Image (cartoon, rainbow, N blue to C red):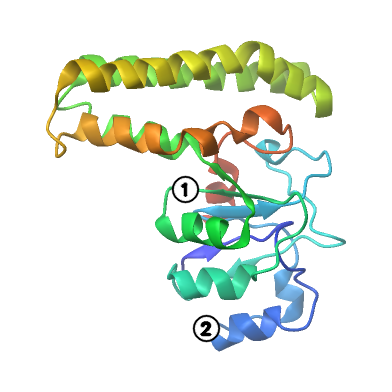
């Protein structure tokens, strides 16, 4: 079942209307079922409170964490479930699906993109451009090494933000310089998987960099996808 988590995003799961909205999409959900964290293949909207979602713990949404199921990922369902009045300073973390981009533009919520989904684009290019795809994967892998160090050091809040700034920011900047250089050097066809991967990353640069400035924003949606597997 396609799903999206509003563990802190645009509408409180305990408020009247959300369980009803879920029901209108053809899904049965008691209000108590809208508690506890579960994530999404793809979208987490949150208001940071210092808890660390990339450790598998939910980001707080008011007094509750919320589980919201979509009948589909159509634009209208995203808007219905997340609502059009996002919390102040909220962040929407998602994959690259266009409905989330449209939602962020419509509501003004800060939109963060998932680095794992960016990585998958380069994995798709490995058979065609193995050397360049491997270089991209190595660069993205270096970001994950920084995140592993953060977990090992148990950094939180400002200390985590500063560590990302000092160690991940240079890797991100170098990655996007490399992406732009490959565009200029390769002259590959738009249908080439590497071209598509480069375009995916370049077009989402701003959203892929959100995690650098906000320690409550995970680098990816992996914790959400893991939480979805039992559903």
199 left or right, relative to 15 = left
Per the image, label 1 sits on a secondary structure element best described as loop
Give how far across and how far down residue 162 sits, in percent. Answer: 75, 18
Give how far across and how far down residue 23 sits, in percent. Answer: 60, 86
Q: Which residue is at 35% across, 38% downward?
A: 200
Give the camera-side residue of 211 and 36. 211
Q: Is residue 46 something that shows in the picture?
A: yes
Q: Which residue is at 73% across, 49% downward?
A: 58
Furthest-right residue in view? 63
Of the two numbered discs 1 and 2 on the same chain, state the one appearing first in sequence. 2
Q: Is residue 89 above or below residue 122?
A: below
Q: Is residue 70 something that shows in the picture?
A: no
Give the camera-side residue of 62 and 90. 90
- The mark found on residue 171 in the picture is none
Q: Is residue 140 above or below residue 117?
A: above
**Mark 2 — residue?**
25
The quadrant holding residue 167 is: top right
Give the camera-side residue of 228 and 166. 166
Marker count (numbered) = 2
Q: Which residue is at 16% across, 37% downward?
A: 190
Q: CA distance from mark 1 to mark 2?
A: 22 Å
The quadrant holding residue 140 is: top left
The quadrant holding residue 183 is: top left
Structural crowding at the residue carrying mark 1, measured as other residues with C-alpha within 10 Å and reported as few (<14), some (14–19) or many (≥20): many
- The mark found on residue 95 in the picture is 1
Q: Which residue is at 77% across, 68% downward?
A: 12
Give how far across and how far down residue 201 sits, in percent. Answer: 39, 33
103 left or right, relative to 133 = right
Q: Is residue 149 above or below residue 52?
A: above
């Amino acid at each position: 079942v396609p799903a999206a988590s509003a563990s802190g995003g645009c509408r409180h799961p305990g408020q009247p209307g959300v369980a009803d909205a879920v029901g209108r999409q053809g899904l049965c959900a008691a209000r108590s079922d809208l508690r506890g964290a579960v994530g999404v293949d793809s979208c987490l909207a949150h208001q940071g409170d210092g808890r660390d979602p990339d450790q598998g713990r939910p980001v707080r949404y008011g007094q509750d964490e919320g589980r919201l199921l979509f009948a589909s990922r159509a634009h209208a369902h995203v808007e219905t479930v997340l609502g059009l009045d996002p919390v102040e300073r909220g962040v929407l973390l998602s994959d690259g699906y266009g409905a989330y981009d449209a939602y962020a533009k419509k509501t003004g919520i800060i939109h963060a993109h998932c680095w794992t989904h960016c990585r998958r684009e380069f994995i798709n290019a490995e058979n065609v451009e193995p050397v360049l795809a491997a270089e991209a994967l190595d660069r993205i892998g270096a970001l994950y090494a920084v995140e592993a160090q953060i977990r090992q050091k148990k950094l939180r809040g400002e200390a985590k933000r500063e560590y990302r700034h000092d160690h991940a920011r240079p890797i991100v900047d170098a990655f996007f310089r490399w992406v732009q250089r490959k565009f200029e050097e390769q002259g590959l066809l738009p249908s080439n998987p590497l071209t598509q991967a480069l375009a995916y990353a370049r077009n989402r640069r701003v959203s892929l960099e959100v995690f650098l400035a906000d320690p409550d924003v995970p680098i990816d949606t992996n914790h959400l996808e893991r939480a979805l597997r039992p559903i």
